[in-house]
Amino acid sequence: MVDLGEHVFPLKKYRLIYEKLLAMGARKENFLEPKPATEEDLLLAHSSKYLKKLEKGNLSNSEILSMELPYTPEFLEFASLYVGGTVLASEEALEEGLAVHIGGGFHHAFPDHGEGFCVLNDVAVAAEKMKSEGKIDRVMMVDCDVHQGNGNAFFFAKRDYAFTFSIHQMDIYPADKPPSTLDIGLWFGDGDEKYLSALRSHFPRLYTEFKPDLIFFLAGADPYEKDQLGGLKVTMEGLNERDRIIIEEARKLRIPLVVLFAGGYAHNVYDTVEIHLSTIKIAKKIQKKYP
Ligand SMILES: [Zn+2]
């Protein structure tokens, strides 16, 4: 495990979620353990020059600064593991209809550099891999993290097989927002009503129009009202309803969906954990209804 000290990124949320799920009755054998993504897979979305820099640890100071993470030699290993997790979750979703990755959604990583806590882009690698293996024709990213999905928007811009949707807050990072296929920009304090009515006006319509074979849902916990980095002021109930809309409308249409956690920086880490756990509970309930 990478130790980030007092960093705002709450790495411990992953362990807390895992432990809570076990306490709620999940069995250890219900969890699939990913293998780190191979170099061949990482090259589907990243330049070899960048991967070499990560491996050798010779990133420049400005490259490390834009990642907003203290560099450690375990970076590549940790990042490859979460990419492997998203690849595994994609394969699982294509078989079972729905899969949750306790992690993933690192949408600010670009082919040749990392940004905003994101080293490697798991969604870009997984989507390219599923496409190149002929497992999917079309893919959709539904990015509900409070920060615009700049890395995904950039990566998929010239790839017709992909549709990127991002609903985010305009007046925060990233300053430069390369256009997604569809961007919904909200503002500080917009709250549940604007957030949910924007989603309702686009879903399930976008699903039925684009007809993806696989959806990556970036269920960021950071639109939450008590988040340190976001200011959209969406309540926990609002986030639950968001998850229901995005997951249920997909499953009604029998479109496979991968849930990724993406960001979440609540003042109280247990709020972030609760939001992610709710997403899992909602997904589970919907999976029962639409197996
Ligand atoms: Zn975020």
Image (spheres, rainbow, N blue to C red):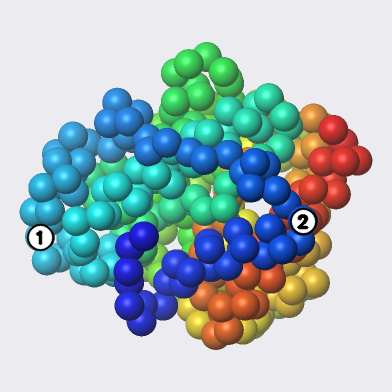
Q: Is residue 244 above or below residue 61?
A: above
Along the line of sight, which residue is nearer the eye, 187 or 262?
262
Q: Nearer the viewer, residue 212 or 179?
A: 212
Q: CA distance from mark 1 to mark 2?
A: 46 Å
Name the residue located 29 percent from the left edge and 26 percent from the top edge.
40
Badge 1 is on which residue? 60
Q: Secondary structure at mark 2?
A: loop
Q: Residue at x 77, y 39 (%)?
A: 250
Seen from the viewer's position, the closer of residues 78 and 259 is 78
Q: Which mark is residue 78?
A: none
Choose mark 1 or mark 2, whichever is in front: 2
Residue 239 lies, in percent from the top left, at 73, 66
Vertical position of residue 199 compared to residue 45: above or below? below
Q: Which residue is mark 2?
A: 25
Q: Are discs 1 and 2 less than 8 Å apart at CB? A: no
Quadrant containing the C terminus is: top right
Q: Residue 231 falls in which quadrant of the image? A: bottom right
